[in-house]
Every structure is written in structure tokens, then in C-alpha cells.
Amino acid sequence: MTTPLLSFIVLSYNYQGYIGQTVRSVLEQTVQDFEIVVVDDGSTDASCEVVTGFGDPRIRLLVNEQNLGGAASYNRAVSAARGEWLVNLDADDWIAPQKSAAQLDMVARDPRLDVIGTHVAFVDAKGDPHPQREVMEAHTNHKHDLNHLDNWIGRNSLCRSSTMVRRAAHLRIGLDDTTMVRAPDYELWTRALRHGCRFSVVPEALTFYRLHARGVTYGDPRGTFLELAYAMLHNLVPLAEARALWPSFSRILAWVSEHEQLAHLTPGERYRLLGSGLMPPKVPGYAGFVAALQAEDDCNPIADAGRRCLALMRAHPLRASLDRLEADNLAFVAGRDWWHEQSDRWRADRAYWHERAAVFEARTTEQQQALDLLQTRLDDAQRRLRWTPAGMARAALSRFFPSW
């Protein structure tokens, strides 16, 4: 059995009205070297019948005996996939025919890449442009370097349904945390960043992301806040410390301390949450993190550290100045990156014109050699013509009759 280049991962739960369009968009890709791994999480509708109805041998349908949730279903799909690249696509979204080709072209230009996304077009439940699409697309569809830690603080600009992930890199960093519901993709991306994976985004809206009532990301603001905070404290803080990015470290703690959902936690949970950024608890995954936050312990050094951290974050007189300074620094970095990009483009243009000049010079040399050869043959022909009888007579008579 040959190994496909791409493994599309489609997760479905009662999406019979959408999954047909999803699978069809994969089958219509301009790159046809793929398999489709569909994991149905115990649907009670006709989703499975829609999938099997395509009759394409490249489609592999895995059905969970019971509802396991998105993260566990995703892990099952990753484990079953065989392709070099894992292409994520939720069963209520769809993609443009040229999406895979555009992402593979980007990898060809930069083989270091591990995660490649695209810009996103937001649609409503019927597949029409979403009324708030301009606001939402302004958040995701702009040029930002996802290899920069600060671009991940408190936000996720990478839509999972748009991504193509190198399978070897995914297996190296691990699977989804199955105890997370609201932000497992954010935790996975920040973990990938922590482990040195390289990100890029195709600046074209090649993924159509459907927003409807069944979405879960923002259904529980408190849970979403805790999952985002866990991912930042567990992945971004160690990365900031390893790279000595102390302003970024400060901004992570500031995001947690100023978030509106912090007020919905008990005082002990607040202190332990902030203290986890200074003294990371050794706990197994997100579930262990939440258990540590809820543990009532009067003599908890993590809570003491969090209490002092919260006091400092709220009372520091230089906070506004530091924020302005960091904003100026980010603007400088953006300008520097722009000039580096322009310099790379100029170098590429110079190399191109040097190559063209070399080709032109080689052709000129060949033409000159051809002319020289032709001139040599003409000269030889003229010499031969002089020594024929007619030529000798003409030469002798021309001395007496110059007009001949």
C-alpha cells in the first residue's frame, strides 16, 4: 500500500447536512495524492451514510463506539493517518480546490515549515458570507508572524480547518490533550511553537469556516479563559524564559491578571493561577492544572507567589511606559522584518538578472564565434577563387584595364 502525500482529517458529529460538501471539496483538490480519514464521534444522524455514499476507496471511515469528544477523535485520526502531511478540516467547513497546492508551494519555497495555514472566509450556517465576516476576518486575515511569541498571547489567529501539519513534527510534539474542550488547538499550536516548529500562512482565503449555534469555543467563557491561561503558562512562559523575552513574560502575566474572567474565580484560584506562571506546578496536563487551582491549601507557596504577583501587576507605576516602549519595539521589529524581506527580494532579483546577463553573454559569445567562423570560410573562399584560371586571367588583365 503506497503512502499518500496528504492525509485529510475530518471530524464529524451529527453533521449530515454539512459533511457532504466538506468531503466533496477534498475530492476536488488539484492535488490528488491523498487519503481522507473521517472519524465519526457516534453520530445519531445519517452522517456515516453520506460519507460511504461517495464510494471512493481513498476515504477511510472510523466510527467511535461512544462519543469521545473532539480531542480524542482527533488523536484517533492522527494515529490512523499515513500521509506525510496531516490536513485538518472540520466536517462543517470546506476548502477551495487549490488550497493544498498553494500550501505545498509554500513548503517548496521554505522546507523548514511544519505548520501552514491559510486565510479564512467566514460563512453562516447556510454557507453564505457571515454578517460579521469583515470584523472576524480582520482578526485572522492579516500579515502576522506566527513564529513570534507575542502574536500568541491571549489570541489564536490560526484556524485549525485551514492547517496542514507535518506528520513527523506532530508525532514529535504529541497529540491533543483530551481533557481540553474549548482551546485544544490553541494549546497544540503554542506547544508546537515551544518545541521549535515553524509556522506560515498562505495569504489567500482558501478555507471556508462555518459559524453556527453548535460551535463550542465561546460557549463557556470561564472554561475558555482557563484553557488559554493554561496553554500560555505551560507553553509560552517557558519559551519566553528560554529566550529571555522578559517583556513577553510580563505581558502574559498581565493578560491573565487583567482578564475579566479572573473575577469569576475564588481568591485562592486567582492566586494559584498567577503563581503558576512563576512557580509552574508539576501536574499531568490540563486536568491536573485545574485540580491544582482548586486545591484548598493554606500553606501553598504557589498561591503566595500569585498574591504578590497580582499586587505588583496592579500597582506598578511604570506599566504604561513599559507598554509604550514595547509597542515601539514591536514596530521596530516589524520594520526590520519588512526591510529584511525587501532585501531578500532584491537579492533574488539581482541573482535573476545576473543569471540573465550570463545567459545573454554566453549567447553573444556563441554568435561572435559563429560570425568568426563564417568570416574565416568567406576568406578561404576568396583565396580559392583567386587561384582559378579565370581568377588568374582577371588578375593579370586588371593591371592593364583597371575598370575590369
Image (cartoon, rainbow, N blue to C red):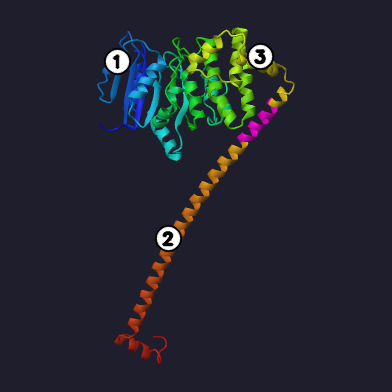
Magenta-span inclusion, residue 198: no
Query: Which amino acid type is marked by label 2?
Result: Arg
Residue at disc 2, secondary structure: helix
Instruction: Locate residue 404 relative to residue 340 in the image: left or right.
Output: left
Give 119 or 83, whichever is nearer the viewer: 83
Earlier residue among tags 2 and 1 = 1
Task: Give whichever of discs 2 and 3 has the lower sequence position.
Answer: 3
Residue position for label 2? 363
Residue 6 placement (x, y as % from top left): 35, 30
Disc 2 and disc 3: Cα gap in Å? Answer: 76 Å
**Distance from Cα at disc 2 to Cα at disc 1:** 61 Å
Q: Is residue 110 left or right of residue 385?
A: right
Taking the view exactly as shown, the residue that stands out farthest to the right is 317
Q: Main secondary structure of the magenta part?
A: helix
Q: Nearer the viewer, residue 36 or 231?
A: 231
Quarter of the rendering occupied by the C terminus: bottom left
Residue drawn at the location 66% of the way across and 14% of the way down: 307
Q: Which residues are magenta?
A: 323-334
Residue annotated with mark 1: 50
Estimate how packed mark 3 is, as few (under 14), some (14 to 19) or many (20 or more) residues with alpha carbons within 10 Å: some
